[in-house]
């Protein structure tokens, strides 16, 4: 999927950022500055949503996988995340199809299941009843990345999640910087 967002406003629209985070948009000098403002203002859920939509799906899935690994302890989830790691290393159609099968076996909404669903959403799927191809829904993989990261935060610490969220955001920003994400939005 090609990246079509050009600035903080477009990314925030794709991420469905709402007030009060949306009120910071006029203050942002660029796409990177906006996420810095979100973090600075302790709007970590919005920052995760924003970064999930700014980053490319493959790198976003790596970020979600990193977070889900820290949040998952059940054997089925660990097995699923090993499969996700295979897809990250080799994003082939075969690995994506295996992710589809694994996603069906995991608890709905669990961090690992969301990672698997993000992988599934990187390619077209098939209607089980009719066999018809279902095209990729724009930004659906990004939505699952967002949910995987947020659910990982709460799986680890639902009482005081901001510390974990900021750790995960630092990791996501490190990925964004390594792939020179913000240069694409300059």
Image (cartoon, rainbow, N blue to C red):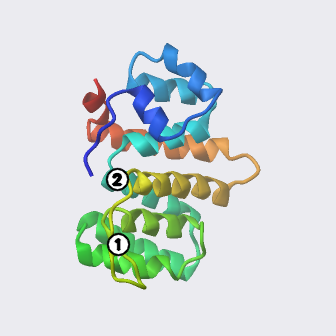
How many badges with numbers are in the image?
2
Q: Nearest the camera: 117 or 76? A: 117
Residue lying furthest right: 159
Question: Looking at the picture, how far across and down is residue 6, in whole percent?
Answer: 32, 30
Q: Residues within 10 Å of mark 2 (few under 14, many from 20)?
A: many
Question: Looking at the picture, how far across and down is residue 2, in whole percent?
Answer: 25, 46
Question: Looking at the picture, how far across and down is residue 59, in whole percent?
Answer: 33, 51
At 55% across and 64% down in the image, what residue appears?
Answer: 111
- In the image, residue 82 sits, relative to residue 64, either above or below, namely below
Could you tell whether 18 is left or right of 115 in the image?
Answer: right
At 45% across and 45% down in the image, what residue appears?
Answer: 52
At 72% across and 54% down in the image, what residue appears?
Answer: 158
Write down the residue under mark 1.
Answer: 125
- The answer to whether residue 172 is seen in the rendering is no
At 44% across and 27% down in the image, what residue appears?
Answer: 9
Mark 1 element type: strand
Write down the residue under mark 2.
Answer: 57
Q: Nearest the camera: 70 or 81? A: 81
The quadrant of the rendering that contains the C terminus is top left
Task: Please identify, in this view, whether the residue under mark 1 or under mark 2 is nearer the observer.
Answer: 1
- In the image, residue 139 sits, relative to residue 83, either above or below, namely above
Label placed on residue 146: none
Disc 1 + disc 2, Cβ < 8 Å = no
Mark 2 element type: helix
- The answer to whether residue 98 is seen in the rendering is yes
Residue lying furthest bottom: 129
- In the image, residue 60 sits, relative to residue 24, either above or below, namely below
Looking at marks 1 and 2 on the same chain, the residue that comes earlier in the sequence is marked by: 2
């Amino acid at each position: 999927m090609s990246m079509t967002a050009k600035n903080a406003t477009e990314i925030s629209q794709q991420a469905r950022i709402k007030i009060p985070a949306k009120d910071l948009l006029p203050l942002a000098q660029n796409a990177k500055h906006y996420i810095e403002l979100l973090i600075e203002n302790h709007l970590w859920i919005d920052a995760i949503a924003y970064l999930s939509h700014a980053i490319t799906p493959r790198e976003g899935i790596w970020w979600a996988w990193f977070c889900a690994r820290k949040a998952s302890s059940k054997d089925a989830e660990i097995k699923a995340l090993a499969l996700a790691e295979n897809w990250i290393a080799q994003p082939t159609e075969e690995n994506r199809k295996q992710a589809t099968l694994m996603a069906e076996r995991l608890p709905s909404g669990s961090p690992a299941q969301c990672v698997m669903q993000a992988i599934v959403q990187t390619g077209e799927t098939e209607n089980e009843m009719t066999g018809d191809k279902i095209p990729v829904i724009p930004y659906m993989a990004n939505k699952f990345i967002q949910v995987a990261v947020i659910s990982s935060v709460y799986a680890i610490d639902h009482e005081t999640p901001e510390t974990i969220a900021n750790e995960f955001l630092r990791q996501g920003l490190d990925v964004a910087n390594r792939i020179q994400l913000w240069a694409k939005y300059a």
